[in-house]
Amino acid sequence: MKIEEIGGGVCAPKGFKANGVHCGIRRNKVKKDFALIVSEVRASAAGVYTSNLVKGAPVVVTKRHLSDGYAQAVIVNSGNANTCNSNGIEIAEDMCALVERAGGIRAEDVIVGSTGVIGQKLDISPMRDHMDELWSGLGDNSTAAAEAIMTTDTVSKQVAVEFILGGKKCRIGGIAKGVGMVCPNMATNLIFLTSDVAISPAMLQRALSEDVKSSFNMVSVDGDQSTNDTCCIMANGLAGNEAVESAGADYKRFAKALNYCTVKLSKMLAKDGEGATKLIECKVTGAKSLKVARTVCKSVIKSSLVKAAMFGADANWGRVLCAIGYSGADVDIYKIDVSFVSRAGSVEVCRDGYGVDFSEELAKKVLSEDEITIAVGLNSGAYSAAAWGCDLTYDYVKINGDYRT
C-alpha cells in the first residue's frame, strides 16, 4: 500500500475548512488563540481522552457530544484549559453554541477543546466577539488553526497523507499541540484529525482506539499526564469509497494510513517538548510479548536520568539498563543489548547485560545529533515497539517555574 505525504493538514481531505485567529484570551496579540475546523457535511467521529480523574470541562462535553458517533466541527481555544472551573461545562457548551449561531451546525455536533493554564476562569466574551471573524475566514487555513492551538510549542504541527481505498483517492490530515504535561494513557494533549474516507462510527472508533496504543500513548515529555488530553477524528465520506463497516482489507489500509499520521505527529510532539533540543526514540526488539516491548521502551523514554544524559551527550548506558530493570517488564537482564544510533553513526555500549569497550569520542558525536535512537535488544522473543521522548534541559525548569505568572 502506497501512502504519499502531502500538504494541507486538516484541510487536505475533501470538504474540510479551518481557521485560527487571535481573540484576546492570550495577552500576546501576535499569537492566535481561537481555532475552528468544519466539515461540509456531518461526519463519523471518534475520540480518545485523558484517563486523569481531573478532567477539563471540554473533555466532558466532547465525550457527551460524540456519544452518537457523529460530529461536524471542532472549536478550540488556547491560553486557558477551562479545567477546575465551577462554570466550565457551561463555557464549553457556550463555545459549541457559538458555532451553531455562526454557521447553523448543531451545537451537539461540535467537538470542543481548551488548552493552557488550569484553574483560571475562562470568559466567553472574547470568543463570542471574534466568532464572526473566525467563521468568515474559514478556508484552506490548516496552519492558522494549528498555530491557534499552540501553548509553549515552538512550531506548529500538522500532517496529511493520500492513499487509495476501494479504488478511490482518500486523505487523512491532522494538527496537534503538545510540549509539556505529556505522558498520556489515552491520547496526548490536543490532536484533531480529519478524513474524507467513508467509514462507520464504530469502525472509526475501533481504529483510533487501537492506533493510540502504538502512537500517542508511546510519547512522554515529562511524565505528567494532562487533564485535557483529547484526540478526535472526523471522517465525512466525501472521497466516495464504499463505506468501511467491518475489519476487512479496506479497514486495515485505513488503519495503516492513520498510523502513519499519528506516528508522524507523535514524533513532532516529542521533539518539541518544553525546552527540548533532541528527539529521543527508544526502539525495543526481541521482546517476549508486545506488552513487554511497550513497557520497556516507555520506561526508558520516561527516565529523567536517561533524558538528562541525552541532553549532555553522555553515553551513560547504565541508566538505560536501570530504567529497564524497574519497568516491571519480564525480561532476562543477561540478554540485553544496547546501542546508541543517530545520523553520526552507531555505537554499541552493552551486550548481554554487560558493558563493552566503545569509543567515547564516537559516542559523543552520535549523541550530539538532534535525533537519537536508543536501540534495545531483549533477545527473548519476536515482538517490538517504539516510544518517543526528548531530552531534559535547563529550559524545561525555567519554562515551568514561571508558566502561570
Image (spheres, grey):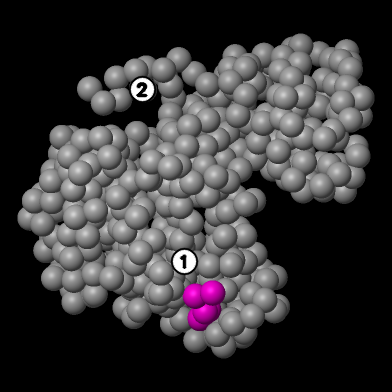
What SS does tag 2 mark? Answer: helix
Q: Which residue is mark 1?
A: 46
Q: Label 2: which residue?
A: 399
Rendered location of residue 274, percent (x, y): 43, 29
Dividing the picture into quadrants, the one containing residue 211 is bottom right
Q: CA distance from mark 1 to mark 2?
A: 33 Å
Query: Is residue 77 rendered to the left or right of residue 392?
Result: left
First reached walking from the N terminus: tag 1 or tag 2: 1
**Quarter of the C terminus within the rendering:** top left
Answer yes or no: is residue 320 visible.
no
Q: Residues within 10 Å of mark 2 (few under 14, many from 20)?
A: some
Residue 156 falls left or right of residue 105: right
Q: Which residues are magenta?
A: 198-202
Residue pictured at 77% horizontal, 35% vertical: 329
Query: Does residue 387 belong to the magenta stretch?
Result: no
Q: Nearer the viewer, residue 383 or 228?
A: 228
Residue 347 % position (x, y): 80, 24
Q: Which mark is residue 125?
A: none
Q: Is residue 186 left or right of residue 15?
A: right
Give the image quarter of residue 303.
top right
Relative image position of residue 171 (x, y in whole percent) = 51, 71
At horizontal 17% and vertical 39% (from top left) the residue drawn is 121
Type of the residue with mark 2? Ile
Rendered location of residue 361, percent (x, y): 74, 12
